Amino acid sequence: MRIEEVLMKINTSDLDAALEELYGQSAVAFQKSRYEKALEGFMALFPESAEADISIFSAPGRTEICGNHTDHQHGRVLAAAVDLDAIAIVTGNGRNVIRLQSEGYPFVEVDLGDLSPKEEEKGTTASLIRGVAACFSGLGVEVGGFDVYMTSSVLSGSGLSSSAAFEVLIGKLIDCMFNDGKAGNEEIAKFGQIAENIYFGKACGLMDQMVSAVGGLVQIDFKYPSSPKIDAHQCNLDKLGFSLVITDTKGSHADLSEEYSAIPKEMRSVARFFGKDNLRDVDEKEFSARISRLKRDPEITDRAILRSAHFFADDSRVGKEAEALDNEDMKTFLELVNESGRSSETLLQNLFSTTTPETQDIPLALLLSRKVLGKEGACRVHGGGFAGTIQAFVPKEKTGEYTEALEGAFGKGACHLLRIRPKGAVQII
């Protein structure tokens, strides 16, 4: 479909139903304007494509609801796609090169003639594109060149997985354009993880990519990481009278790699005590019975024991939270969210960096949240922790008061009111 035809669809009501499903009725007008602006950006960058057939794709960010640092121990998580997303305007270019402009970032070109990992590309956008393309090539898919203009509302560093949305979006458009959609979204998620692990050079689990790819509210069991079990659940927070609010405390993620890597390292030290590779394969009752022995083991720290106790508790909470939401039992759900938050605070201990203990943005945000919410809502650290974001379930009548209090401390725009998005990565046009 040519750009002028797409613009006509946007300016009429032809796309309204699709946009409403992804973003909600109240956001349709804004999204139509956003898509028009993206098309303008595409045309300014690739004017030769005025008469070409274009496609539009979308992939969402995600929010982790329960299961804080459980996935890397082959545990369970409860997470949801959200209505912040990355969108891509794309057309084939007949060349053997991918040309990509992501709004606000440098222009990127990736030569498809060599899809091997590049040491000099580690940590770059190009590495992610090359990695995803290489995965499809490994399936025997002949990936052709294309031009793409991308814009994202999943802010980098927001704790909502902007990198996963990017990887999944690239995978979705390659799958649809060159593979007739045969790979499917779950396989696309795995390709994103491979690209991030091997090409980008960052160790990560599969949760972020999987939730972005499949969408909705999902419980994911990583007992077998290569083929995780995914169960869909239903949740209409608006109907239940609550808002989902993510607050960016604006803390820096720089120099936190040791803090993050210490968590799986310490948990695995406990697993090895029981002759296992990860805590999922350790019997919780046996762990509890052997805590005194663990304490006396010179290879295991006190913190490792506490963090392992958090794993067992949060892994168990995942199913309970999912069941509470299925039953529209917000009282039980909120109690479990608060339990999870306290567990991260006291056992997992990922609310602030031990190298800069004087800076404690996340504990401060939780203090303010609890003062506003009292016993009427719930809050917890969001994502990896140490710096970044918190998550709160706020009664709708308190949303204004809550936002004012948190943004008073962390700045205007720090709070993001999110809607659970029913679909993951999709081709819109």
Image (spheres, rainbow, N blue to C red):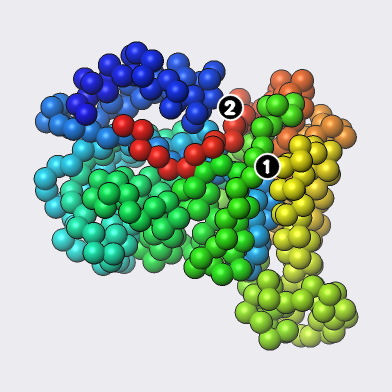
- Name the residue that disc number 1 marks: 390
User: How far apart are the alpha carbons under marks 1 and 2?
Assistant: 14 Å
Q: Please state the horizontal and vertical placement of residue 294, each as a whole percent of the image.
A: 81, 81
Residue 420 drawn above or below residue 112: above
Crowdedness of circle 1 by 10 Å Cα count: few (<14), some, many (20+)? Answer: many
Tell me what residue is drawn at x 80 percent, y 39 percent.
329
Identify residue type, mark 1.
Ile
Say whether residue 386 is left or right of residue 45: right
- Mark identifier at residue 1: none
Quadrant of residue 44 within the rendered picture: top left
The number of callouts visible is 2
Q: Please state the horizontal and vertical placement of residue 344, each as a whole percent of the image.
A: 75, 55
Q: Please state the horizontal and vertical placement of residue 73, each as a whole percent of the image.
A: 63, 68
Front residue of 17/392: it is 17
Residue 375 visible: yes
Asked which secondary structure carries label 2, the reply is loop
Point out the image quarter for the C terminus: top left
Residue 44 visible: no
Q: Are marks 1 and 2 in contact (CB under 8 Å)?
A: no
Tell me what residue is drawn at x 75 percent, y 69 percent.
308
Crowdedness of circle 2 by 10 Å Cα count: few (<14), some, many (20+)? Answer: few
Residue 248 drawn above or below residue 352: above
Asked which secondary structure carries label 1, the reply is strand
Query: Between disc 1 and disc 2, whose residue precedes?
Result: 1
- Name the residue that disc number 2 marks: 413
Front residue of 283/249: it is 283
Tell me what residue is drawn at x 20 percent, y 44 percent.
146
Identify residue type, mark 2.
Gly
Say whether residue 223 is left or right of residue 393: left
